[in-house]
């Protein structure tokens, strides 16, 4: 078991190394560099030379990669071009904001998704299922920029209950941020919940049709006891990985929603730094998003392993 | 008169087709189950036997519904009862032992909890008392060290142990009626015999009534007092089991019994034509009309009623049963097979060993072999041209593994596979040339999985013809039609897809595909075990006919010793990947000499209440072959001592050419027969 965890962590680190190489090479290959972008028309002669020296671009690429990587491991991603401030400081509040948004969506979305999924599966083809399933399929198919815009139109503009876009400094306190995030959270949670509810539904239906559930019924186990003891633990196991992917997707920045609501999260930072050709920030973002995906998937796999007795013993035996 | 505990009255269950028609799975079933008796319900797949058993618990599967009739238990109709009331009967008064315990035990709950759950629901015992009861129950079903078993998860037990747990769970509620749905199908022969013996013991010990559902007349014969034979949703014959098995007076049962291969008879059983009609396709008249050898004009348009014959205490649904009453040939006629093999050697395995163990990285780098105890070891077999050689053994004996290596699907670890005396075949598919691939063809167990569902029969059979012979156009078509005729399928099958065929027809297509390559050797991997008995006999006869026509050599793998007896010239008995005995089938079956062969043959269930299985050894499951000594030492009842544990036994050859690998001297081996 311990061996397995170490192996998985090592694999994760290798993945991150490869991601960092790809982004580094990618930014190298692109025509132009940080200095030409920054200096625009002044990008020649003395000034360009000075800029190269200041940013350390005058040494060979592999040397730059090594020094960048060594600093990155220590949490220092260098300087952002646009604001000429340390990327660390740019990222910090953005990560916090994205975390707030994601955790709000998770805490609301996952319980609702589980309940809806289970209810639709248990009352399969009956009224609750038909009604909820129609709504979830609907919610799944509307793109988030439409639902977000509609939310702004109805709740912010017509009803004037909540602010439509987020116009706050990046580093406001949580309480001040709260009213601002309600609409974005609804927009994200809708689509995420719908996806997950469908997943849970099919998983529960599959387990309900299994021989061991039929056996539990024939053993005389009362309905709800059967659902909680025999059905749900087995049906929700495969859901863990889907939940993990969703969380990673949320943390990685729900780009479209953040842009529509002007929300200062990681997603918008990605868009901004790409359009500004702020390559150091893009690099830093790539590596951070990759580590989020890798670590959350690792956690999910370990959790499945712990909860599934079958996998656990198999691993131990090996 | 004994008390009746379950009364089934005019029961009909069915479903609505897409067109809105009512399609019946069970048609007007009436029967009684008496206290303390064991009733066997037998029929082929699709006869409605499981649906009937489930209905006896008031359970109707999703998609089916009760059309009429009732299942009366304690004078109340289970099919109309509310779920809350049913919960008090299920598991407490009527309990079920499922077909596949591996699937029927909830994977995330420990064995102990699952039994405890039944106890909590159906008894008033306190916690400590329940704990003790769990141990008692596990003891009763003869599981070793109940305390540790209770803490295990279902997947940590072997198939036989899982089935025993299911029995223990059913007994937890001390039910009056036990329903068993194919409880031993899918278990090894020896395990099956042990589980049946346990069930017989429980029936006597507790006086519980049992309803035993199975397609296997051999198993039914061992346990039941009374037998109900079902055919396409109807009872066609019902009566005392001895009479039904010895003198079946319904043509279907008669044909069924004739189509079962028997251990005592060499040669192929007689097959029954056709297959059971699908629900919803039944017309007027007797549902068995198409396949019946005794039918008359009136059977075509009139359905016979179930008629009770007082003197035989038997009910029969046939106009013509009288013509069968004096026929007692059931157990005698077989189609004798011709021994047709030549003296020329076609395939030679020498010192073949196969290992499933993954090579460690270091060993791979140094190119050394790390596993000194491989799954399959020391396999030496000479196969003659035109011979049928069978590999037999329980699951895990390595029989399919050897087959895969011959086919080139699994790399051997050592040894040589030689074709036609001088051509050495690589065990890696990629290193074989097209002709090496052509000469060896495979037929798999399950035609549902081995035929591509998106290809028509024509495309399936055309593939080897195009690949190996480059046939095209008219010539290709002619060849396909020819092959279809060889396997007794008409030309019109060409445009059909596998899903439009019955199980037997699919397997015929698979046979035709194998023969299309004009192979010298065909590997048959459990080719009949997914088929119903009546269809099995037809496929066996077909294989035999084709062999005689083409002079093909078969390597036949099966767990069913009676089938092997019927078709093979020579038998190789395997245990834990090591050969125990190789010899002409006649000798292996008549004078089983290796202790393991004795165990295997003793456990075979025959459809005859007078032939009881002999249980010689425990049905323990060994995970790995022993490091040294005889492979069978762990289960052998005739073990001599240290010599068996330390030294690999030598080959001893009998006068009739039977090779036996055992330390016990030949004379003693033959003297001490348990027959």
Image (tube, grey):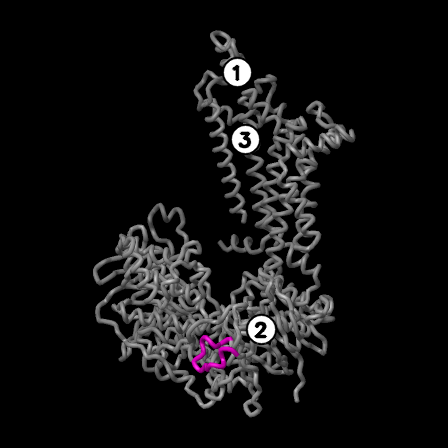
Q: Which of marks 3 and 1 is in front?
A: 1
Q: Nearer the viewer, residue B205 or A128?
A: A128
For mark 1, name the chain.
Answer: A
- CB atoms at circles 3 and 1 under 8 Å apart? no
Whether the magenta-drawn stretch holds residue B293 is answered as: yes
Q: Residue A287 carries which label?
A: 3
B515 and B262: which one is in front? Answer: B515
Q: What stretch is highlighted in magenta?
A: B287-301
**Of the pair A74 and B404, the residue shown nearer to us:** B404
Q: Are marks 1 and 2 in one subunit?
A: no
Q: Is residue A61 left or right of residue B427?
A: right
Q: Which of marks 3 and 2 is in front?
A: 2
Question: On the image, numbered disc 2 is attached to which residue?
Answer: B180
Magenta residue check for B655? no
Quadrant in which the N terminus of chain B appears = bottom right
- Can residue B62 be seen in the rendering of this structure? yes
x and y, in percent, of residue B247 in the image:
48, 87
Specify the label residue B458 is tagged with.
none
In this figure, which residue is indicated by the disc labeled 1? A37
Dot 2 surroundings within 10 Å: few (below 14), some, or many (20 or more)?
many
- Residue B20 horizontal/vertical position (percent): 60, 62
Q: Is mark 1 on a helix, strand or loop?
A: helix
Marks 3/2: CA distance? Answer: 59 Å
């Amino acid at each position: 078991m311990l061996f397995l965890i170490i192996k998985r962590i090592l694999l994760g680190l290798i993945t991150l190394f490869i991601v960092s190489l790809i982004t580094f090479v990618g930014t190298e290959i692109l025509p132009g560099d940080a200095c030409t972008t920054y200096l625009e028309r002044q990008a020649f002669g003395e000034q360009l030379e000075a800029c190269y020296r200041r940013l350390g671009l005058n040494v060979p690429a592999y040397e730059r990669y090594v020094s960048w990587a060594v600093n990155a491991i220590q949490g220092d991603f260098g300087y952002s071009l646009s604001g000429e401030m340390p990327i660390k400081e740019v990222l910090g509040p953005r990560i916090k904001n994205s975390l707030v948004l994601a955790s709000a969506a998770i805490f609301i979305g996952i319980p609702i998704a589980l309940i809806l999924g289970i209810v639709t599966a248990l009352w399969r083809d009956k009224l609750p299922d038909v009604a909820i399933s129609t709504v979830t399929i609907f919610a799944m198919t509307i793109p988030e920029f439409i639902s977000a815009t509609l939310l702004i139109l109805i709740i912010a503009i017509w009803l004037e209950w909540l602010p439509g876009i987020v116009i706050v400094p990046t580093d406001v306190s949580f309480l001040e941020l709260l009213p601002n995030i309600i609409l974005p959270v609804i927009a994200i949670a809708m689509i995420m919940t719908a996806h997950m509810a469908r997943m849970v539904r099919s998983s529960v239906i599959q387990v309900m049709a299994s021989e061991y559930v039929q056996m539990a019924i024939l053993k005389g186990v009362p309905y709800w006891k059967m659902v909680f003891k025999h059905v749900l633990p087995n049906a929700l196991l495969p859901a863990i990985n889907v939940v993990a992917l969703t969380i990673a997707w949320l943390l990685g920045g729900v780009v479209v929603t953040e842009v529509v609501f002007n929300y200062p999260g990681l997603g918008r930072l990605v868009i901004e730094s790409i359009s500004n050709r702020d390559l150091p920030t893009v690099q830093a973002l790539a590596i951070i998003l990759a580590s989020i995906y890798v670590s959350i998937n690792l956690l999910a796999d370990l959790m499945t392993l712990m909860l599934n007795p079958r996998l656990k013993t198999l691993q131990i035996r090996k | 008169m004994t008390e009746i505990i379950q009364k089934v009255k005019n029961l009909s269950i069915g479903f609505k087709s897409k067109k809105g028609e009512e399609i019946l799975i069970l048609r007007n079933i009436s029967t009684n189950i008496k206290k303390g008796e064991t009733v066997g319900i037998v029929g082929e797949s699709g006869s409605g036997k499981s649906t009937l058993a489930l209905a006896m618990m008031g359970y109707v599967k999703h998609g089916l519904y009760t059309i009429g009739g009732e299942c009366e238990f304690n004078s109340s109709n289970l099919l109309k009862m509310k779920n809350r009331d049913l919960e008090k009967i299920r598991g407490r008064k009527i309990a079920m032992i499922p077909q596949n315990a591996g699937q029927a035990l909830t994977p995330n709950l420990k064995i102990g909890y699952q039994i405890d759950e039944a106890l909590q629901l159906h008894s008033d015992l306190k916690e400590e008392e329940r704990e003790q009861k769990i141990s008692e129950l596990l003891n009763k079903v003869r599981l070793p060290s109940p305390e540790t078993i209770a803490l295990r998860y279902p997947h940590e037990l072997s198939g036989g142990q899982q089935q025993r747990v299911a029995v223990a769970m059913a007994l937890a509620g001390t039910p009056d009626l036990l329903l068993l749905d194919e409880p031993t199908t899918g278990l090894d022969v020896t395990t099956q015999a042990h589980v049946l013996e346990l069930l017989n013991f429980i029936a006597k010990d507790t006086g519980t009534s049992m309803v035993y559902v199975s397609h296997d007349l051999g198993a039914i014969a061992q346990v039941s007092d009374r037998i109900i034979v079902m055919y396409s949703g109807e009872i066609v014959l019902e009566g005392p089991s001895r009479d039904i098995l010895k003198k079946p007076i319904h043509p279907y049962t008669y044909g069924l019994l004739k189509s079962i291969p028997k251990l005592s008879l060499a040669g192929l059983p007689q097959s029954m034509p056709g297959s059971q009609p699908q629900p919803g396709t039944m017309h007027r008249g007797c549902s068995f009309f198409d396949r019946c050898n005794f039918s008359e004009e009136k059977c075509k348009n009139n359905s016979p009623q179930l008629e009770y014959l007082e003197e035989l205490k038997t009910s029969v649904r046939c106009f013509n049963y009288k013509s069968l009453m004096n026929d007692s040939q059931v157990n005698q006629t077989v189609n004798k097979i011709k021994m047709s093999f030549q003296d020329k050697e076609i395939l030679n395995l020498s010192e073949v060993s196969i290992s499933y163990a993954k090579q460690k990285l270091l060993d791979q780098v140094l190119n050394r072999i790390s596993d000194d105890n491989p799954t399959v070891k020391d396999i030496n077999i000479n196969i003659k041209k035109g011979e049928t050689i069978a590999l037999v053994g329980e699951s895990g004996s390595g029989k399919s593994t050897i087959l895969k290596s011959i086919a080139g699907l699994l790399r051997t670890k050592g040894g040589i596979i030689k074709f036609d005396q001088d051509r050495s075949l690589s065990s890696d598919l990629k290193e074989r040339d097209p002709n090496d691939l052509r000469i060896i063809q495979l037929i798999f167990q399950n035609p549902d999985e081995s035929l591509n569902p998106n290809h028509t029969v024509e495309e399936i059979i055309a593939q080897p013809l195009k690949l190996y012979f480059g046939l095209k156009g008219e010539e290709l078509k002619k060849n396909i039609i020819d092959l279809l005729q060889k396997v007794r399928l008409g030309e019109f099958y060409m445009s059909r897809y596998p899903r439009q065929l019955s199980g037997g027809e699919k397997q015929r297509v698979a046979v035709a595909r194998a023969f299309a390559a004009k192979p010298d050797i065909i590997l048959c991997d459990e080719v009949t075990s997914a088929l119903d008995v009546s269809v099995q006999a037809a496929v066996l006869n077909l294989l035999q006919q084709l062999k005689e026509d083409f002079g093909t050599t078969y390597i036949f793998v099966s767990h069913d010793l009676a089938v092997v007896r019927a078709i093979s010239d020579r038998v190789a008995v395997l245990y834990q990947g090591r050969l125990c005995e190789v010899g002409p089938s006649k000798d292996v079956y008549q004078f089983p000499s290796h202790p393991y062969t004795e165990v295997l043959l003793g456990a075979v269930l025959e459809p005859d209440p007078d032939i009881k299985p002999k249980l010689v050894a425990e049905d323990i499951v060994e995970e790995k072959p022993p490091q040294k000594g005889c492979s069978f030492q762990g289960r052998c009842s005739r073990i001599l001592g240290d010599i068996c544990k330390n030294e690999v036994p030598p080959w001893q050859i009998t006068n009739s050419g039977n090779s036996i690998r055992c330390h016990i001297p030949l004379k003693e081996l033959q003297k001490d027969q348990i027959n």
